[in-house]
Image: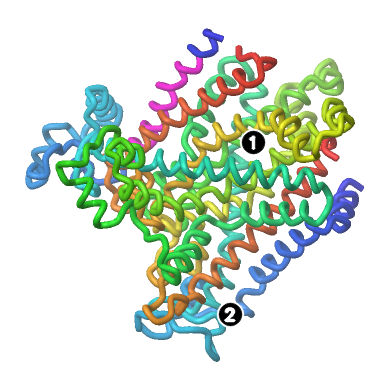
Amino acid sequence: MVRYLIRRLMMLPLVVLGVTFLLFFLTQRLSPEMRASLYVKDPRQMGSLEEVIRQYGLRDNVFKQYGRWLAQVARGDLGYSPSANMPVAQAIKQYFPATVQLALVTMVLVVFFGVWFGVFSAVHKDRWQDTLARVISVGGFSLPIFVLGLLLLMLFYGKLGWFAPGGYSLQTDLIIHSGSFKMYTGFLLLDAVLNGNGRVFIDVLSHLVLPAVTLCIGSFALMVRVMRSSMLEELGKDYVRTARAKGLLPRQVVYKHAGKNAIIPVITLAGIQFIRLLGGTVIVETIFDYPGIGRFGVIAAQQLDIAGILGFSLMVAVLFVLGNLLSDLLYTAVDPRIRLD
Amino acid sequence: MFQNRILKRICTNKTSLAGFILVAFFGLVALLAPWLAPVHNKNNPYQMPQKSYAIAPQPPSGGYWFGTTEQQYDLYYGVVWGARLAFEIGVTVTFFAFLVGLLVGATAAYFGGKVDEVLMRLTDVVFAVPSLVLAMVIAAMLGPDIKNMMIALTVVSWPSYARLIRGDILSVKQRDYVTAARTLGARGPRILLRHILPNSIYPSVVVASLDIGYVVLTAASLSFLGLGAQPGTADWGQLIAMSRNWVLGTAQNPFAYWYTVAAPGGAIFLFVLGWNLLGDAFRDILDPRQV
């Protein structure tokens, strides 16, 4: 177990080096002037790029440059992002909590509705309810999130005016940037609770609804499927028959007995899906103009902001490796029969 | 006989039949594109014709069945030729990704040891970042156009085939007939090409071809983000990106521009749905454990 952990953690630098070198190598196609932005720390420096190019040897070979970039990163300096108009490290620190918040709310929706639909489907196996659940989940899986997002925006913002795009309203913006609102964690929902500010909480939550619903569609289908088959397996077991024979209500048998055991694979799947959601946030945050790390990455990519792109990719790679490791550990925690070595 | 059995299974199952019909329909549209929507620009048939330079989209009317986008690109032309482009992107990317995967997977499985270790760690690196994010970043660095987008998609897709093929070869490598060929004095490359590959490659070929829907979806996402096809290209993702500014409609009628999303959104949804339904059926057929 410990050996496994160590081996997996050793993968981390390998993966991060691999991904960043690949991207760094690709940046060499761009002119040194464009690449200079990676090393500029202050917007005022942008005036004299030639100096920056000379100072950092941007015309050297790629390995030398990459080594220098790594050393800079090791010191915690990720460069300056012109697209976000702030240092990359600061942009990540500012945008990241919003994305985590979005992914968490999405996961709650996915697990809640996925489990409910899955049980519903399993209990009515091979009847029209089951077919309906299947059609909805396959349909949801095939509907591109950018199409769904636009449709929801059209209906719930354009027509009904319920949920606005963005991260929060103008009033909330004024409140959280006033002196009286303290940013304890950077997670706005949590900070609103800590400040005892109900209005900010509701406002932030209402801005999360559309992105979260859009984002959950892909994972939802998978969740329904896993819950359904897991539930069917449990319902066929002896203890369920015993419970039924004792004369328990069908609802009790389904939820208290079979449901408790059937939910185990769903929990581990949720762990894995949580990390996968990050890919989807890129699109969802763009559609809803949600101030998260995904939108930061997209804007950096669109504007060829190299410092932003490299910083974003570096962060995603680290997060992904750690997340996958965590979900592997979760497997062993939930099911002791699985051993990692 | 093998093919017959699969065909029969597909035709008897309602959902897989629906998937087959959808994919076949789009295949037909793609093939017949020059007749369904006569080419407007001979040098680049994927360039959509433009009615005028007026900004606001126009609803469906006589000559423009699906309406027009902003700057008056013909949506009907875009959706029809978009089907052709979708197949072109899907097939090209899957083909090259499979080729690279085959090369890497076969090399890793055949040589084993250090070579295997290095090549598999390489696949880990690509797997370590969500494919959409990695493709997005690579496409941005290469510069947004369709060819670069296809390169980016190939770079992120090959590792899964490499792993699949490696696994299949490793299991076939142990079979008796391979040992028999070796004892008869056959050399390495001959064993690999004549004995191992033909017996291990088919499941991967099927899996790869069913990924076409997913590749097209990712490609459309990139175009939507402005990192794939450029404005004016008959690409579904691009058409949806062009509708983004109009989904909120006007103050009087929030659904005023519904048609800008409807046609390309419907096309991509049905296309991906078709492949997914077909994929489900094949997974059931290929995996005999599931009944």
Residue A25 among those drawn in magenta = yes
**Which part of the image, by quadrant, shows the C terminus of chain A?**
top right
With B52 as the anchor, is B264 left or right in this view?
right
Q: Nearer the viewer, mark 2 or mark 1?
A: 2
Q: Nearer the viewer, residue A263 or B195?
A: A263
Across and down, in percent, residue B181 comes to 83, 21
- Residue at label 2? B37
Residue A269 among those drawn in magenta = no
Q: Say which chain tag 2 marks.
A: B
Q: Do pointers 2 and 1 mark residues of a single chain?
A: yes
Q: Main secondary structure of the magenta part?
A: helix
Q: Say which chain tag 1 marks.
A: B
Task: Please tell me in which quadrant of the rendered image residue A293 appears.
Answer: top left
Q: Is residue B247 above or below residue A223?
A: below
With B282 as the anchor, is A96 left or right in this view?
left
Circle nearer the N terminus (2, 1): 2
Across and down, in percent, residue B127 comes to 52, 33
Q: Residues within 10 Å of mark 1 (few under 14, many from 20)?
A: many
With B167 as the anchor, is B84 left or right in this view?
left
Q: Is residue B286 above or below residue B83?
A: above
Report the residue at 62% width, 54% height from top: A140
What is the three-letter code of the residue carrying label 2?
Ala
Task: Please tell me in which quadrant of the rendered image residue B36 appears.
Answer: bottom right
Residue range highlighted in magenta: A7-27
Across and down, in percent, residue A324 comes to 52, 27
Label drawn at residue A88: none
Disc 2, SS:
loop
- Residue at label 1? B102
